[in-house]
Image: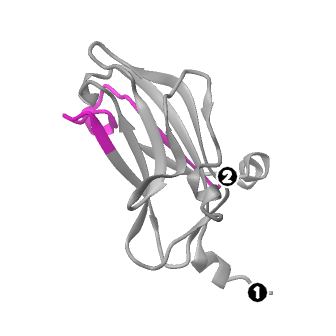
Amino acid sequence: MRISALTESERAQTGFSHCIRVGYSSVPAENDFNVAAATATLQPLTLLAGDTVAYPLAHVYTKTAPAGAGLSAPTISVGVTGTADALVASGTPVTGRSLGAIGPAATGGGPFVSDGTAKFLTITIGSTGNLSLATAGEILVFVNVIRAADLAKVQG
């Protein structure tokens, strides 16, 4: 998994602050699918007290759908600790396509704000076969995180 903070130009173009690459790699330590199970939950970002996942919340773009012999019906969702699909509901990653940018958090009243307990942004990947059977796949997850510590530094 690779986490990138977007540049100011990229932020202006997309509305997101971070891009998280989830994908297959032939190097086991870099392979997000290297899990001897049908489901894996990744925790790419810690959300501290007051941190907010703001609109446009999150967006999933599939560069290459997860694939491999014995791997079928892959799924991905984006959420927070305790609610796997709080930002993007579980869906099937299809090459060249996106999953909805506004998930269940929007219908629940708006963006997610961390209450100070240990919270993480979560990405849950799954399939009907063992994820370690994947031989391909690259999914980009975009999120818009506003850090409370950054807001406290603003001189208004």
Instruction: Name the spot of residue 150 as percent of width and height, x first.
Output: 63, 76
Against 59, is 133 above or below? above
Report the amino acid beneath label 1: Gln
Q: Residue at x 26, y 15 (%)?
A: 70
Relative vertical location of residue 21 with respect to residue 130 in this rendering, above or below: below
Task: Write down the residue under mark 1.
Answer: 155
The stretch drawn in magenta includes residue 39: yes
The x, y position of residue 128, in whole percent, is 30, 26
Q: Residue furthest top?
A: 69
As helix, strand or loop, the secondary structure at mark 2 comes to loop
Q: Is 105 drawn above or below residue 124 in the view shown?
A: below
Span of residues in magenta: 16-40
Q: Say whether residue 29 is magenta.
A: yes
Per the image, label 1 sits on a secondary structure element best described as loop
- 47 left or right of 40 in image: right
Q: Which mark is residue 16?
A: 2
